[in-house]
Amino acid sequence: MRYVQPELLEHLASSYVLGTLTGGARRRFERLQRDRADVRVLVTQWESRLGQLAVSVPVHQPSPRVWAAIAARTQPARPQRAAQAKAGRLGWLKPAGFGFGGLAAGVMVATVLFVTAPGLFMSSDQIAMRTGEKLPQSYVGLLTDAQGNGKLLVSSLRHGRTMTVKVIGPITPPAGGTLVLWAVPASGPAFALGPVPTSGSAVSMLPDTSEKLLSKVGKLVVTLETDAAPAAPSGPVVFSGNCAKLW
């Protein structure tokens, strides 16, 4: 399966975070995350969105029957005498009023803190990796219009074969023509990298690894082309920016 459709990636990322993506599909998606920075960013975005739900839900105290049923299913039965002896040995370690409900409440609090304040549990480098602030060896480009307004963020792993184009500023869909992204090497003709979306993001397959295609590219441009598959840029330049190496 080619994971290039934004709608498919959004669906997989949301299902993964919700926990409804299971079995082999979940394992394949986890492998995909390791290989693609754009997929990790999507997962982080969904974690942020859904994590806020845990904060907004009001606290409800479960009835004693709920905890009793959970304890009956999760705690193996033990002889009464052994249980009392263990309680006597460990009783001095147990704070007053602490029970299974307190343990569950503690787990819930820790979960909320992990979502809302990850700095308490992870290093700054780990947080940066999860939030997409620091990409593993990648080619990236920020493309702007003639006024300097940011319009597109282009990224591709150094040895990857996919390229992600994300719209970060409003783009008016062209009335007649197609927006095409071009790589402009220091020497040699420009070559097309793929079409450009006017909203959201798009993932394109590359004919070779980014290292081979972009290692000598210093500039990225977007032109408005009337031909659906132009061999060379011929239309006006709409957006442009440098192609940078993140390593």
Image (tube, rainbow, N blue to C red):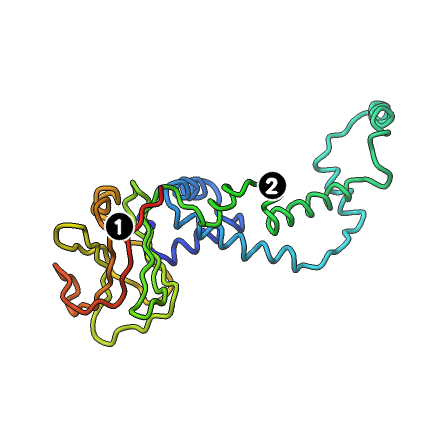
Find numbered disc 1 in the image and state the secondary structure of the residue it sits on: strand
Asked if residue 232 is positioned above or below residue 87 in the image, the reply reads below
User: Which residue is at 44% across, 41% downward?
Assistant: 30
Q: Of the residues shown, which amino acid type is indicated by label 2?
A: Phe
Does 148 sit left or right of 126 as displayed?
A: left
Q: Position of residue 82 (x, y in %)?
A: 83, 23
Find numbered disc 2 in the image and state the secondary structure of the residue it sits on: loop
Residue most extreme to the bottom: 175
Q: Position of residue 231 (x, y in %)?
A: 12, 59
Q: Which mark is residue 121?
A: 2
Decide which of tag 1 and tag 2 comes sooner along the chain: 2
The residue closer to the viewer here, 134 or 33, is 134
Asked if residue 6 is positioned above or below residue 108 in the image, the reply reads below
Measured in 3D between alpha carbons, the distance from the residue under mark 1 to the one under mark 2, in whole angstroms, is 36 Å
Identify the residue position indicated by label 1 in the image. Answer: 205
Rate crowding at label 1 as few (under 14), some (14 to 19) or many (20 or more) other CA atoms within 10 Å: some
Rate crowding at label 2 as few (under 14), some (14 to 19) or many (20 or more) other CA atoms within 10 Å: few
Does 94 sit left or right of 245 as displayed?
A: right
Asked if residue 34 is positioned above or below residue 221 in the image, the reply reads above
Q: Position of residue 235 (x, y in %)?
A: 16, 68
Disc number lying in front (1 or 2) = 2
User: Which residue is at 29% across, 69% downward?
Assistant: 146
Q: Which mark is residue 122?
A: none
Q: Of the residues shown, which amino acid type is indicated by label 1?
A: Met
Q: Quadrant of residue 137?
A: top left
Q: Position of residue 140 (x, y in %)?
A: 33, 51
CB under 8 Å between callouts 1 and 2? no
Q: Quadrant of the C terminus?
A: top left
User: Which residue is at 28% across, 52% downward?
Assistant: 243
The residue closer to the viewer here, 133 or 104, is 133
Q: Quadrant of residue 119?
A: top right
